[in-house]
Amino acid sequence: MSSAIRSGAVSPKTVKRYMVSIQQLAPYLDCDLSDITVERILDIVERRKAGNKTHATIKRDLSALASVLGVAIGRRWMPRPNPVRAFFELNKEERGKIVREVKRKIVLPRPQDIMLVKSQSSAMWGWLMDAAMKTGAREDELIKLELDHIEYKYGRLTIYGAKSGGGGKRDRTRTIDLKVMAGTALFGEIPRYLGSPYVFWHDDGEPFTNFFSHFHRKVKAIARWAKANGVDFRPFTFHSLRHWHAIEFLRSRSGTLHELQFRLGHSTIKTTEEYINSGLLSAEEVQWALFGGHSHGLDFSRASGHKSGHNNEYGGLESSRNALI
């Protein structure tokens, strides 16, 4: 890359933009070059769309990745064709088929895994993880959260989202009820930094930057340590804490599926329906999620094939913020 800059083939501005894009995609590319396939590219696109990334952002980052992979192919580090270029050539029907084939299974982090990451992280990271589990908010939404976005009197916080992508005009701003799952008490305990508007901060009250990548590297480091020391640890992403919240929200009958859709900020109910199809809920919990207290005597267990008698092993998880790094 440096030789390309010296030759004038690539401007420093372009290099900077490429580096930002690759950094954003890095958590999805923890694999060998040969494992970067069209299926993986489409999986990345689906996950970033679920995180409310705009079409322009996704396309920009993929264009940067295509250029980097093009160099790798040219140096024979990976075989042809370029998976990103191949992805762009797919039609809508072909993409839909791949989406169905690579649909992700929702896996919740175990309490001991969450506790281990907290024990090796700063106190504020612990608060961030707890907030994700109490609200279901995305990591970027929590990072940007300001003190005046929380109304303690009414027990709620407002997520001020950007306009939806693809030329849409719908504002993604939403309000999250903090009274559900004891969220009000949690936010009341988070220490503030005098003069900083941010709820979550570091050093001199500054907001976190590149938190997604930092969290990913932290978990990878813990996984290496755990393997070397014979400790049972299952790596997880920060986004999986959002899944934890969604499943716990439905298990505790805190609201219906449509209420969860609004809480999570999903643009379509189909995305939220992944939770009732995850196998992590009992028949009764699925029935409540769909109909609330108005099931009208439906025997949902026969129709759904879900098994009842589900035990919630995640109830009562307490946080630990004793370790500081």
Image (spheres, helix red, strand yellow):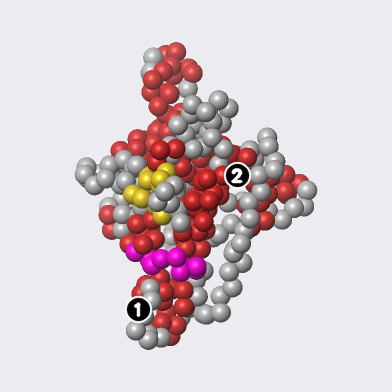
Residue 67 % position (x, y): 40, 32
Depicted 319 relative to depicted 215: above or below: below
Residue at the spot of label 1: 294
Magenta residues, as a range? 250-258
Residue 306 % position (x, y): 48, 78
Regarding residue 144, the answer to whether it shows in the image is no
- Along the line of sight, which residue is nearer the eye, 58 or 163? 163
Which residue sits furthest right? 229
**Which residue type does callout 1 highlight?**
His
Query: Looking at the image, which residue is at 46% across and 59% down?
Result: 180
Residue 95 % position (x, y): 33, 55
- Label 2 or label 1, whichever comes before in sequence order: 2
Within 10 Å of the Cα at label 2, are there few (<14), some (14-19), or many (20+) other Cα atoms? many
Query: Looking at the image, which residue is at 39% across and 61% down?
Result: 260
Regarding residue 255, the answer to whether it shows in the image is yes
Q: Which mark is residue 126?
A: 2
**Which residue type does callout 2 highlight?**
Gly
Q: Secondary structure at mark 1?
A: loop
- Along the line of sight, which residue is nearer the eye, 46 or 6? 46
Residue 105 % position (x, y): 49, 62
Which residue sits furthest front? 153
